[in-house]
Image (cartoon, rainbow, N blue to C red):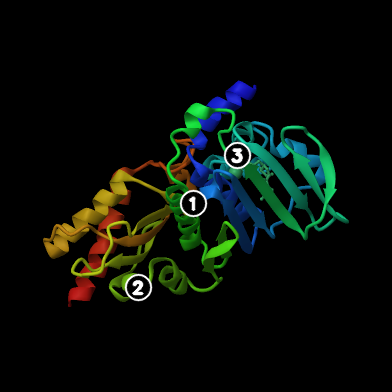
């Protein structure tokens, strides 16, 4: 089973940033309002993610590390959201199989926190407020071939920061801070989406972009799209979310590019932060273990909605 977990880990955990992505995901699922990420050595030596979410009852702590153990299926109703949100109970087990991991957690009912060491299975009393801390040390220590593929600490740190920023754009109501080697490297206070976009991408993006907001049938496309003539625009300002989850989708990026070509006849690289809200049954998120790819039931419908939404934002800005 250790081997199965390690193979699963290969799909979910590619580098420290993948661990950050999964741990922050879990913290958000737990209803956290403040998430702190503490990294050492670009996240290779240590990743600590602390949240003030609901916590894990001590009786369920060992379950959290088991493969296919998700607490996110509690009723038949939830089965639908499991299918749509892609809960599989795989991430923590996979991470623990390729690192030295420990979880400390405390719920509102607990008098104190408990800490579970993944490798030894030892459960000890711990001190922390309500919420969960997951500690992941020495990523890929037991799989040197994988560790060899990691880049410099600076590069791995940059990827970790990008993981946090992706989540942060989708959840402006949540505060995020990232520390590296004991230094605060990113602090995002909770606020409006506009403020969050400014904090993450800078005024260069918010000043040179236009609001997108279009409702087409059961679909809504909103966010901001950059003006192609913006001199300071950066080609990596491309963020797309489906039902709050960050995705990379060829169909969506094609829809955006088509809008740019239609309105501006330009070949500039589009920049955007776009949120697509769609009925959960019209999208399948379980295409890829990291849930970054999605499959739409009606891809034409999505392509057209995205194209129209971006087109009207760009056309308005020219008028
Ligand atoms: P999934 O998120 O798909 O359920 P994970 O392996 O990521 O699977 O997590 C397993 C389980 O551990 C979750 O279902 C949840 O019950 C618990 N868990 C993990 N992280 C946290 C957290 N930060 N706060 C509360 N519960 C958590
Ligand atoms: Mg998870």
**Mark 1 vs ligand 1: CB below 8 Å:** no
* Disc 3 secondary structure class: loop
Residue carrying label 2: 206
Image quadrant of residue 70? top right
Cα gap from disc 3 to disc 1, whole angstroms: 15 Å
Q: Residues within 10 Å of mark 1 (few under 14, many from 20)?
A: many
Q: Residue at x 66, y 57 (%)?
A: 51
Cα gap from disc 2 to disc 3, whole angstroms: 39 Å
* Observer able to see residue 40: yes
- In the rendered structure, the answer to whether residue 309 lies left or right of residue 22 reads left
Q: Residues within 10 Å of mark 2 (few under 14, many from 20)?
A: some
Ligand 2 found in image quarter = top right
Q: Earlier in the sequence, mark 3 or mark 1?
A: 3
**Mark 3 vs ligand 1: CB below 8 Å:** no
* Marks 3, 1: nearer the viewer: 3
Q: Residues within 10 Å of mark 3 (few under 14, many from 20)?
A: some
Image quarter (top left, top right, bottom left or bottom right) of the N terminus: top right
Q: Is residue 317 above or below residue 121?
A: below
Q: Residue furthest left?
A: 265
Number of marks in picture: 3
Q: Earlier in the sequence, mark 2 or mark 3?
A: 3
* Marks 2, 3: nearer the viewer: 3
Cα gap from disc 1 to disc 2, whole angstroms: 23 Å
Counting from the top left corner in percent of width and height, residue 135 is at 66, 46
Counting from the top left corner in percent of width and height, residue 54 is at 72, 56
Residue carrying label 1: 160
Residue carrying label 3: 138
Q: Residue at x 40, y 41 (%)?
A: 293
């Amino acid at each position: 089973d250790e081997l199965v977990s390690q193979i699963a880990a290969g799909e979910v955990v590619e580098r420290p940033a993948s661990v950050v992505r999964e741990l922050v995901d879990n913290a958000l699922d737990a209803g956290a309002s403040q998430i702190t990420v503490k990294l050492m050595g670009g996240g290779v030596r240590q990743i600590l993610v602390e949240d003030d979410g609901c916590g894990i009852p001590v009786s369920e702590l060992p379950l959290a590390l088991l493969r296919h153990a998700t607490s996110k299926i509690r009723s038949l109703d939830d089965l639908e959201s499991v299918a749509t949100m892609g809960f599989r109970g795989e991430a923590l087990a996979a991470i623990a199989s390729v690192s030295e991991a420990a979880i400390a957690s405390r719920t509102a009912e607990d008098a104190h926190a408990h800490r579970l060491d993944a490798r030894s299975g030892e459960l000890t009393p711990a001190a922390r407020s309500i919420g969960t801390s997951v500690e992941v040390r020495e990523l890929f220590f037991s799989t040197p071939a994988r560790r060899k593929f990691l880049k410099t600490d600076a590069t791995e740190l940059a990827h970790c920061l990008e993981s946090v920023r992706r989540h942060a754009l989708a959840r402006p109501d949540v505060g995020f801070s990232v520390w590296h080697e004991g230094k605060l490297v990113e602090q995002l206070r909770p606020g409006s989406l506009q403020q969050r976009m400014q904090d993450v991408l800078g005024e260069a993006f918010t000043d040179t972009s236009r609001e997108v907001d279009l409702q087409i049938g059961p679909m809504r496309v909103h966010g901001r799209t950059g003006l192609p003539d913006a001199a300071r625009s950066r080609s990596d300002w491309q963020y797309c979310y489906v039902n709050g989850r960050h995705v990379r989708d060829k169909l969506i990026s094609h829809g955006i590019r088509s809008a740019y070509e239609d309105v501006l006849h330009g070949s500039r690289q589009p920049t955007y932060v776009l949120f697509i809200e769609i009925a959960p049954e019209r999208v399948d998120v379980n295409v890829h273990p990291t849930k970054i790819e999605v499959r739409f039931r009606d891809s034409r419908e999505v392509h057209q909605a995205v194209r129209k939404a971006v087109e009207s934002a760009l056309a308005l800005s020219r008028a």
